[in-house]
Amino acid sequence: MTGLEGRRILVTGGAGFIGSQLVTTLLDATGAAHVRVLDSLATGHLENLAHLHDHVEAGRLQVRVGDIVTDSPDALDDVDVVFHLACLGVRHSLHDPMGNHRVNAEGTLALLQEALRRDVDRFVHVSSSEVYGTARYAPMDEGHPTCPETVYGGSKLAGEAYARAHFRTYGMPVVVARPFNTYGPRSHFEGDSGEVIPRSIVRALCGLPALVFGDGEQTRDFTHVRDTAAGLVALAQCDAALGETVNLGSGSEVSINDLATLVAGIVGLEGPAATHLDPRPGDVRRLIVDDSLMRSLTGWRPGVDFADGVEDLVGWFRTRQQSPEEMLARIEDRNWVPA
């Protein structure tokens, strides 16, 4: 398969954070003929796609509200390429493990089976660095042991195992992507989807320090969402990636303490940058990518500097219609506990 121009594409989870950026990239940069979104709106939001209204009017973008377990058959009508991002997240798995498994593992299997039946040209399964658990060595290549800390990580590992099995058993054109931590515009701050960077920014805009669970020396490999989306598109167009499991990250390691300090400096927060609380259950201690396989296969390189990306995201939050105080009201401090 050479390129996505003229292709009919399904993006599951396309109203979510990464999904909406991927849809934007597909419509604006690849010449895709038509993009269909399937999203249950459990964590995604239609407003994440509002900037693509012209593509809806032109008939190039269609949004369907539905569940991948039950609605995959209709969503796959006349589809050439699938990007599968629909999932429920880490914190959700801590209070609803069975629900998390149903979407992330069973939903993936249902979608794969239907895509196989319809003989799609390419299936990009988007997994997560959470399948690794805490780094046993660094940087972490694709051969690093997989020992998830949470049911989320386990369900994502099951989903990617099903994807690889479809390649090996049926010859289905599958590639598995393992993005590390992604940040950027439209990232989740609210509910059990809320991530550390947007949560910390909202708190700082309200004059409050970031909440850091544990000592704050846990590290993450943060990649801007535009780079993540570009990487997924590159993998979809790479025949050499078929059957492969490929890391996608920046190769830079940032501690949560340093992140809190950076956000406080950009916002101009006075006083301490962070308040430390008890550790969060199932928290991964260290993540940093070895993305040499991704680079050798596709030539992809991340283009957004981390500090610049965080500053850009602060500016994005400052332009929201909701005030920082209104956004803060939607943040649950311990967002892994049932509401």
Image (spheres, rainbow, N blue to C red):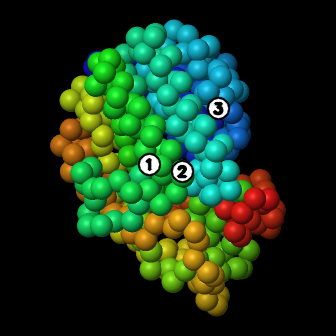
Judge whether 184 appears above or below 44 on screen.
Answer: below
Residue for badge 2: 152
Distance from the alpha carbon under mark 2 to that under mark 1: 9 Å
Q: Earlier in the sequence, mark 3 or mark 1?
A: 3
Q: State if disc 1 and disc 3 touch (CB < 8 Å).
A: no
- Number of marks in the image? 3
Nearest the eye: 164 or 53:
164
Name the front one of labels 3 and 1: 1
| Residue 6 % position (x, y) | 42, 14
Tell me the number on the disc at residue 128.
1
| Residue 296 % position (x, y) | 18, 43
Looking at this view, name the residue that lies furthest to the bottom.
271
| Residue 184 % position (x, y) | 53, 54
Q: Quadrant location of the N terminus?
A: top left
Judge whether 196 appears above or below 66 on screen.
Answer: below
Q: Quadrant location of the C terminus?
A: bottom right
Name the front one of labels 2 and 1: 2
Q: State if disc 1 and disc 2 touch (CB < 8 Å).
A: yes
